[in-house]
Image (cartoon, rainbow, N blue to C red):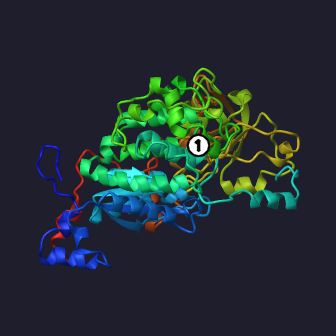
């Protein structure tokens, strides 16, 4: 295999398998399992990193997808080896899958680093599995490719009928929720083949694409096209622009900085806001629009959205296809209906807005495309819930002292306070107001929100309450003001009073005193830094690839 200068480049896996000595003998014999001897002849060894689990509905079909990837790898002259990783099933895992995203990324990273792999195909789908796999793979930098009733209006029978039709096939949510957003981000970053993000799981074209992906990863190994050559600042620019055009999930505002941080790329949240002002909202998809993901795929998917905003993209960015993003988008055009034309947007501004102010001296996030226009500039008195348990116990009290102008506030839903920053941000509308016809209110928390949710909901407020941010000392009756156009979120109490409250505040006891929970609490960064662990971010020092070093040292 050439290194580009005409000399032969040794593959990483050859440290395990090449040569006739006791160490390579051991590795080849342990990994034989009926393989003919020539599979260890120096061909690329391709890992298939599979987050399949029967506990993760979105990913339950990935065993079948893996078989099609293997076909493509064999066909292109590689050796496919499938391995499992931790899987994060939304919304089965409690208190939240976000608590374990970083752990899954560590599982992926160390599995790649320790094993004789030259490249990897990431099989993911459910909300946190896509960013977790990309974060782990970015830290190793191998050639990588992703194959990514409360109103009383429903009777019990009608409610069960809705439930029965809610998830009718393999695959993740059929709206532009977090799962669809993050697979779209993987494509916009350039880590998938063109058009991969939106193919329905039950569509035979998904399996065909998996086959082609298997072929392509072998070629990427021969080209030595590594993830760090794809996940560049330009790629993240493209992903953020696409996120705004899609009206995608606010969770991407956490996951993209976390992925970038693994490569030493600083991704301040100002970039999301800057591009929000430049990029229109074009994808007419639920929960912010009217269509579902199958219609999005038929309309051209992510490439058609990106083609409409080419003027703001970094078209020279390299992609997993081996050519630039601009070349991938050549001749692509959407339908003008599900994916609106640039000249006829759903909104002239993108979907994501970053707020700051006396209530959010760090940052806070709102999904403008899912908010009510009349609440984008609003002043109201707060009604505060100190914990999620308190909210659930009292939100439907008939004597709850709230009206449509009230600002509902939830504390202690952040990374440390949740713990794990659960999707608690879409506070329910009080039942008494629902019965009056109220469908939206301004709601504020340090938690996250499901990408399938909607409403005027301010999220990811930093510093979080459990870390002593101003959110921790908001009191019922305080006035709060939001102004989306000015990007402001303010607690309207005198500065002296705010400082007095903060000085008197005491932190809540930690949720964990040992184990992984303790590691999480001690090491997790804030939402504005992606909630990664501080020790996992790239520090500019090349990480040792200890696999090849120890491969010739025999058994431990």
Residue labelled with disc 1 = 297
Q: Is residue 119 left or right of residue 346?
A: left
Residue furthest front in the image: 75
Quadrant, the C terminus: bottom left
> Considering depth in this image, is 316 or 182 the residue closer to the camera?
316
The count of marks equals: 1
Q: Position of residue 532 (x, y in %)?
A: 43, 50
- 238 over 255 or under it: above or below: above
Task: Name the element at disc 1.
Answer: helix
The image shows residue 469, relative to residue 216, as above or below, that is: above
Quarter of the image for residue 42 reads bottom left
Q: Can residue 413 be spotted in the picture?
A: yes
**Residue at position x 55%, y 52% from top?**
421
State the residue lying farthest toward the top. 343
The vertical placement of 57 against 283, above or below, is below
The image shows residue 378 at horizontal and vertical percentages of: 70, 28
Please give the name of the residue rendered at 53% of the width and 34% of the height, measured from the top-left corner: 304
Q: 183 or 537, which is in the foreground? A: 183
Residue 58 in the image, given as x and y percentages of width and height: 58, 59
Residue 556 at least partly seen: no
Eyeballing the image, is 136 above or below 19?
A: above
Q: Nearer the viewer, residue 320 or 527?
A: 320
User: Left or right of 463: which side holds 324?
Assistant: left
Residue lying at 49% horizontally and 43% vertically, measured from the top left: 195
């Amino acid at each position: 295999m050439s290194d580009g200068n005409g000399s032969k480049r040794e593959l990483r896996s050859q440290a395990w398998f090449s040569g006739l000595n006791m160490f390579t003998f051991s590795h080849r014999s342990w990994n034989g399992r009926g393989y003919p001897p020539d599979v260890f002849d120096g061909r690329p060894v391709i890992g298939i990193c599979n987050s399949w689990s029967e506990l993760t509905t979105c990913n339950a079909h990935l065993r079948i997808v893996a078989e099609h990837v293997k076909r493509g790898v064999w066909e292109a002259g590689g050796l496919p080896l499938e391995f499992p990783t931790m899987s994060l099933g939304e919304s089965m895992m409690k208190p939240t899958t976000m608590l374990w995203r970083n752990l899954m990324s560590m599982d992926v990273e160390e599995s790649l680093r320790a094993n004789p792999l030259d490249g990897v195909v990431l099989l993911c789908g459910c909300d946190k599995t896509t960013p977790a796999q990309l974060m782990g793979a970015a830290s190793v930098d191998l050639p990588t490719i992703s194959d990514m009733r409360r109103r009383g209006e429903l009777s019990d029978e009608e409610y069960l009928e809705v439930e029965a039709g809610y998830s009718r096939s393999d695959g993740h949510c059929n709206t532009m929720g977090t799962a669809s957003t993050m697979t779209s981000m993987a494509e916009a970053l350039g880590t998938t083949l063109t058009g991969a993000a939106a193919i329905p799981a039950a569509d035979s074209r998904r399996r065909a694409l998996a086959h082609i992906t298997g072929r392509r990863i072998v070629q990427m190994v021969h080209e030595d096209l590594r993830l760090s050559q794809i996940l560049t600042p330009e790629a993240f620019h493209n992903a953020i622009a696409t996120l705004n055009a899609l009206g995608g999930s606010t969770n991407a505002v956490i996951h993209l900085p976390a992925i970038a941080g693994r490569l030493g790329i600083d991704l301040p949240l100002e970039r999301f806001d800057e591009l929000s002002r430049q990029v229109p909202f074009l994808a007419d998809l639920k929960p912010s629009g009217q269509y579902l993901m199958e219609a999005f795929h038929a309309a051209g998917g992510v490439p058609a959205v990106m083609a409409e905003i080419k003027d703001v993209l970094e078209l020279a960015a390299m992609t997993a296809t081996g050519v630039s993003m601009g070349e991938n988008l050549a001749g692509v055009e959407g339908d003008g209906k599900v994916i609106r034309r640039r000249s006829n947007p759903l909104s002239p501004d993108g979907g994501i807005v970053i707020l700051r102010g006396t209530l959010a001296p760090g940052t806070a996030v709102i999904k403008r495309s899912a908010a009510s226009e009349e609440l984008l500039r609003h002043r109201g008195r707060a009604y505060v819930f100190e914990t999620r348990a308190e909210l659930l116990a009292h939100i439907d009290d008939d004597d709850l002292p709230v009206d449509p102008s009230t600002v509902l506030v939830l504390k202690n839903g952040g990374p440390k306070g949740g713990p794990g920053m659960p999707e608690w941000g879409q506070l329910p509308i009080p039942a008494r107001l629902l019965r009056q016809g109220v469908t939206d209110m301004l709601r504020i928390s340090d938690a996250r929100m499901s990408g399938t949710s909607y409403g005027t909901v301010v999220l990811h407020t930093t510093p979080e309450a459990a870390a002593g941010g101003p959110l921790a000392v908001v009191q019922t009756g305080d006035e709060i003001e939001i102004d989306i156009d000015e990007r402001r979120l303010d607690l309207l109490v005198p500065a002296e009073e705010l400082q007095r409250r903060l000085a008197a505040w005491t932190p809540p006891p930690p949720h964990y005193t040992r184990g992984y929970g303790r590691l999480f609490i001690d090491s997790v960064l804030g939402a504005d830094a992606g909630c990664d662990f501080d020790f996992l971010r790239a520090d500019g020092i090349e990480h040792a690839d200890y696999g090849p070093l120890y491969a010739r040292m025999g058994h431990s």
